[in-house]
Amino acid sequence: MQILSIILNILTLIAIFGVYFWSKKNLLKKNVFYPENNNIKTHFFEKEVVKHFDFINIKDYKLFQNFEIDGLNRINIFTGFNNSGKTTLLEAIYLLTQQNNMGAFFEIIKLKNKLDVLNTQYLNSYIDDDIEISGKFNNIETNIDFKKFEASNIDKKDDYLASYKIISSIDNKFLDTTVHTFKSNPLERRYEKIEILCNTIFKSPYFYNQSEIINTHSKNVELKVFDLIVEFIQKHIDKNIKDIKFTEKNKIKKFLVDSEAFPKKSVDITSYGEGLQRIFEIALSFAYCKNGVLLIDELETAIHYSLLVDFTKFIQELAIKFNVQVFITTHSKECINAFMTNEENNEDISFFTMVKDKNGKIQTINYDNQSLIDELEQNLEVRGW
């Protein structure tokens, strides 16, 4: 009887701890935000775009207050000192293209802060300020207005944190998305539909998004243009590479490189340098962003300066082929020189230096092509002062 009693007590304890850990695990799941990447999203501009952004106004976003930039082109290059707002500008443009896609807003926070998952309590501590951004895309005005607020018309249960709302507009057609967050209870999402402006990718050397890379590869295969990227890599980086193939085995997804340097088996692309991988991932993005926008932060990162002339030329060729507007930040004078000397059309390029005035307000200095060429030839500093 004593042995039976001990066994029953042990089983009871196991059951109690099992319920506890199951509850804890599921409560943690509930207060984590999973971006709604699988939701159906419509694209206001997907097939025909005659003109991309020609101006952007950032009324309120982080460093920017009542900031406007015009004179935008197919290729737009931004330079300036650290903390002059270059990356933040790319973020603002990305958010404007995403309209009422709340998942995109929260995904940026997750990636920038190098989080595996975005906890609602972290989100609540991170977001305080309103966001308002507008612009003109394909000759149509568009706007987003993001606010954090305390809801008064919902059941707050016992663990309500905060609510977030985006109101977006394209050509005076309005949509909104609202998310109510709780410490442990499930998120509440409310929207009629999600509509983004156009396909957009934000490529940063500090973000890694495998699903995005796989999606861009699929689009290149679908449009039968993937060989262009492999050919560029063969010609300019490694002539031994014969092909790059996406594989999935036992739920492990990777890109394998078929190279004459490794005759016995293909090797994972991660066996190659960061520069080759970065060129591969950026080049894949163009077909996916067809008729849309590609944002590239610190283009030169991991790429040897000797490749920049050929790669910037390739970027311009792909931008024309897929009708993509490109926004690039850089600290590299070699990168700026490469765009000016790669024998592509300089008229497609706008160049901006971002500086802060004596009051700390961000300003831009826009160089026309001839002025920029003259400054570079005289070895003058165009990256900020």
Image: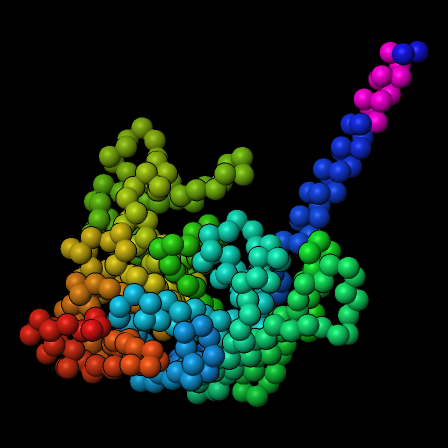
Asked if 86 appears above or below 357 in the picture, the reply is above
- Residue 222 seen in the current view: no
Residue 165 horizontal/vertical position (percent): 62, 73
Q: Which of 46 and 350 is in front in this view?
A: 350
Residue under the point 46% across and 52% down: 114
Q: Main secondary structure of the magenta part?
A: helix
Q: Give the residue at the far left of this rendering.
A: 378
Q: Which quadrant would the C terminus be assigned to in this image?
A: bottom left
**Taking 129 as reference, is 56 above or below it?**
below
State the residue at coordinates (39%, 83%). 67
Residue 251 in percent (x, y) is at 54, 39
Q: Is residue 124 at all visible to an observer of this figure?
A: yes
Q: Quadrant of residue 49?
A: bottom left
Q: Which stretch appears magenta?
A: 3-12
- Residue 10 lies within the magenta run: yes
**Residue 127 magenta-highlighted:** no
Please report the residue visible at 41 percent of the width from the left and 77 percent of the height from the top. Answer: 64
Q: Where's residue 15, x and y in %?
A: 80, 30
Residue at figure coordinates x 59%, y 85% from the top left: 173
Vertical position of residue 147 compared to residue 25: above or below: below
